[in-house]
Each structure stands twice: as structure tokens, then as C-alpha cells.
Amino acid sequence: MCPNPLMNEKDKDRVLRVCQALREAERPVRILRGLAWPQNVREKFFAMKARALPDVAYASFDCAPVLETLQSARRLIDDRSVVGSWLARQANAIELASRMLAVAGTSEFLVFSRRLYGTPTDLLVDEKSNTLELAKLIDKILGDLAHVELGAPEPACYLAATVAAEIKQAVETKFGEEAPEVAVVEELSANALAGARRIRIRRSACFTDKDIAQLIHHEAFIHVATALNGQAQTELPILAAGHPGTTRTQEGLAVFAEFITGSMELDRLQRLSGRVLAIQMVIDGADFLDVYRYFLDRTGNEEQSFENARRVFRGGVITGGTPFTKDIVYLDGLLRVHNFLRSAVAAGRSDCLRLLFCGKLDIEDVPALCELAQAGLCRPPKYLPPWAEDLRFLIAYLSYSRFLNNVDLSLVTAHYEQLLKDAPQVGAVKANVSHTVPES
């Protein structure tokens, strides 16, 4: 692939025209909106005592106009260059997303979901590990901790209005006049969703002590920040588009933010692993009732279990075999983002770190954005999460994290297992790790 060390005005104009066309093609492709279930589906499910499969129909989606606009954009793309390859990937992701919406509710849906988001057994960059293994490990570790008192406060339900007030204060402080509206709404596909102009919180959602910080760092300081930064990229408007080709990295950054700020906790981590395990269950043939009961065993909460199962079956086939695989990207993206960050630091390329926030993008886009920044087309991000504003701590942490990768954990684990083998357990009190918590 040919680098573009120097872009002339003609090249820059072509990039701008392609980005504008891609942005136009992407606008009608709204995945979560197109796959949303009407509220009466849940009402009927519980009216039938949770014993019958839901009956869900999806509105038809005509992908022809999207494909026509993409065809025009592709005529201008030279995919032999780094920047051209980036543009081609954007076009491919938008096409796959539009085709996925067009076959919602059929077994063909999984073909496109798999290509856009992957599946739990897909190999990571190391060509050895996968997200399913991580989910199983998390589940095992948290299960082994069930007897330990971890010091969590008593279960509490913070109301949506309280959460909205605290988020509103945080975003106004961070974004000033560009701060999004924070609204409490009656119906939402998750407990909270964020865009550049609006953060919505479901009125019936119940929040715990760490959920407010988690929502601020995940939804506001990542999703809102990258949306606003993308809107400022007037020469590269496609960076304002949060299409499925960028979802893995965007959610990976958001979950990494939860870890690095200390707002991640066990309920949240268990919820992320449970989604991955449930998606694999559906691929293996589980139907909606199987997955609903699986989540009910984990949470003890009927409404939350329905919502968890709904996330897995949006756009898929209720009788099994065809899930919506998007929810693997939280753990999959976390692994990729964390590994990229520490590898970039180890390679002496910390100059790339802040590029991750210049808009809606995928890690694989970074080389192209380096060239576009050099050409004056990609602007530095206006807004950064607090943990990325001062890179001293982040680079120190990543340097240490990178060294840990060289340690043979199997030998270390064997040593300490032997050390603790005969030591009595201390404070054998079961921890509460199944609170009802918000879905992001």
C-alpha cells in the first residue's frame, strides 16, 4: 500500500468529496432505531407469564439509495493508498450495515452482523485468544469471589432524575455551550444512550452508586466527546458518523475509560461477560426463552432479564441461531483498545494516542488519520476525557501494563496457588454481585 507523504490540492478535494458522499450515504442507516422493539412486545411477553416467544416484526428498509450513493463515492476512491483504503473501509461498513437492516428478522441477518461486529469465537490480533474466552474467565473469577465480602454498599436505586442532574452538571462543565441536552425519557433501547446533542436516560431505570460515574466517563466523556470532535472535522465529515465500522473502537474506548477512572465494578463487568456468553448461546441454537431464563438466573430481575435478552435478539431470529452480535464489542473493543494503547507507547508512538478521540473511528484508521493530520485535513480533538488530557499518568500506566505482558502468568499463578493452598479463607461472606444496573 502506498503512503501519501504529500497530498496536493486535487487529492484533498477528492478526499473531501468522498467523505461528504459517505456521510450522506450513512445518514439513513440507523441500526438501533431500525431494530428497536415496540414497548407492547414486552407487555405481551409478561402478560403470557414469560412462557411464549415474543412476536416481533421489523419495518422494511430499502438499501438501494444508500448503495447508489456509495457507488458514486467509490468512483473517487483509490484504495491503493493508506487514505484510500480508509475511505474504502468506511464505504464497506456502511454498505454492510444497510444490507443488514434490509434482512432484519431473517437468518441472513447474522451474515452481516458477523462481518460488522464479529462473533465471540473470532480470533483477536494475536491469532490465539477470543472474546468468548475472556467472558468465561470473567464469569469464573467473579463466581469464585461470590463468598468474599468486597465492601460494596447496600443495594440502592438512584432515580433517573437524580442521575440526569449529575450528568447535566458534568457535561456543562466539560463542553460548555456545546453541552448536550440531558433528558429523561419513557422508552429507550438501553438505560442510557448518548449523542452529540442529547443524552437520554430511561425513566424506569434503576442506578447504583457507581453508575453515575460510569455513565459520565462512558457516555459523555467518550461518546459525546468523539461526536463533537467529529462534527468539528469539516474537511472529513465522515468522522462525525458513528456507523458500525467504528463501534468496536468507540465502545472499547468507553469501557477502557471505565477501567482507567475506577468507575468499572463487578456488576458491570459481569453484565458485559453475560452478553457475550448469551450471544454464543444463540449461535449454538438457544431461543429467546432460553436466554431470558439464563439472564433471570444471573440477575433475579424479570424486566432486566427481558431487556438483556432483547439486546441479543434485536434483528435476529427469536427461535435461535441468529443473534445480533453487537454486544461482543464491549469486551472485544476493550481488548483491542488496551492492546493498541500499550503497543503504541512501547513503540514510541504516543503521538498517535490523542488521534483516537478526533471523531468516530476505528483503530485501523489511525495510519490514515496520521497522514490526514499531516496534510492539515484532520484537526486535533477539541475535547479529551480527563485521563487523556495529561498523558503522564496514562503513559506510565501503559508502560507498566506492557511489561506485565512479558511475565509468564502460568508460573506466577502456580506459585501463589501453592502459597495460599492451606491458608484459611478470611471473612467468608457472600458478596452481592447481582444488583439491577443500567445497560450501556
Image (tube, rainbow, N blue to C red):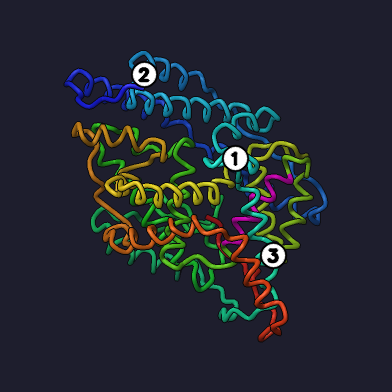
Q: Earlier in the sequence, mark 2 or mark 3?
A: 2
Alpha-carbon distance for marks 3 and 1?
29 Å
In what quadrant of the picture does the N terminus appear? top left
- Range of residues picked out in magenta: 269-281
Q: Position of residue 113 (x, y in %)?
A: 60, 34
Q: Comparing marks 2 and 3, which lies closer to the viewer?
A: 2
Q: Is 367 left or right of 333, judged from the image as shown?
A: left
Between marks 3 and 1 in the image, the one whose residue lies nearer the viewer: 1
Q: Residue at x 53, y 27 (%)?
A: 96
Q: Residues within 10 Å of mark 2 (few under 14, many from 20)?
A: few
Q: Residue at x 75, y 62 (%)?
A: 297
Q: Which disc, if any, is residue 80?
A: 2
Give the labeled residue for mark 3: 299
Marks 3 and 1, the one that precedes in the sequence: 1
Report, in whole angstroms, how far the alpha carbon at label 2 lies from the one at label 3.
50 Å
- Residue type at the position of mark 3: Thr
- Element class at badge 2: loop
Residue underneath mark 1: 123
403 vs 283, nearest the viewer:
403
In this picture, residue 54 sits left or right of residue 148: right
Q: Amino acid at mark 1?
A: Leu
Q: Quick check: 375 left or right of 47?
A: left
Q: Is residue 37 visible?
A: yes
